[in-house]
Amino acid sequence: MAAPLGSYAEFWPHYLRAHRNRRSRGLHYAGTSLALLCLAMAIATMDWRFLIAAPVVGYAFAWIGHLGFEGNRPATFGHPFWSLFSDLRMLGLWVTGRLGPHLAQAGVEAG
């Protein structure tokens, strides 16, 4: 059994290793982006249904990635807030082209 993660600094490399597969990361990017779009639509239209859609869309893509490509359990279950922050962080780093060094430091090949 793995030692419990006591800090976000310990969690981040663990999170990246749980997202080794680039297709899984791609699904996370799509799901997180669509969830953010749903939140923006909720604000723009004042339609609460977009608030419901945001986590459904985001998690659906992520869980497909975990079940289909990673074969592991999403980190959301053990650390929901760290996991959400890491989803956003990973997307931001990927969009800005700065994710590679983080993956390498965690022992994950970027390709």
Image: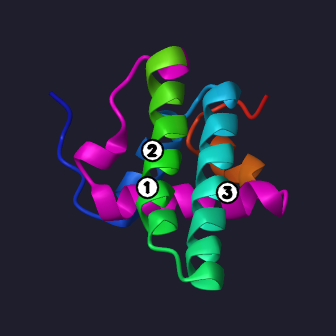
Q: Is residue 37 magenta?
A: no
**Residue plotted at (24% across, 52% down):** 5
Q: Which mark is residue 55?
A: 1
Q: Which x, y percent locates residue 9?
A: 41, 63
**Mark 2 residue type:** Tyr
Residue holding disc 2: 59
Does the CB distance between marks 2 and 3 fall below 8 Å? no
**Residue plotted at (22% across, 60% down):** 6
Does the CB distance between marks 2 and 1 fall below 8 Å? yes
Alpha-carbon neighbours of circle 1 within 10 Å: few (<14), some, or many (≥20)?
Answer: some
Lower position in the chain sequence, tag 3 or tag 1? 3
Q: State the CA–CA distance, disc 2 to disc 1.
A: 6 Å
Q: Quadrant of residue 35?
A: bottom right
Residue holding disc 3: 33
**Mark 1 residue type:** Pro
Q: Disc 1 on helix, strand or loop? A: helix
Residue 85 in view in this figure: no
Q: State the CA–CA distance, disc 3 to disc 1.
A: 11 Å
Lower position in the chain sequence, tag 2 or tag 3? 3
Q: Disc 3 on helix, strand or loop? A: helix
**Mark 3 residue type:** Ser
Q: Quadrant of the N terminus?
A: top left
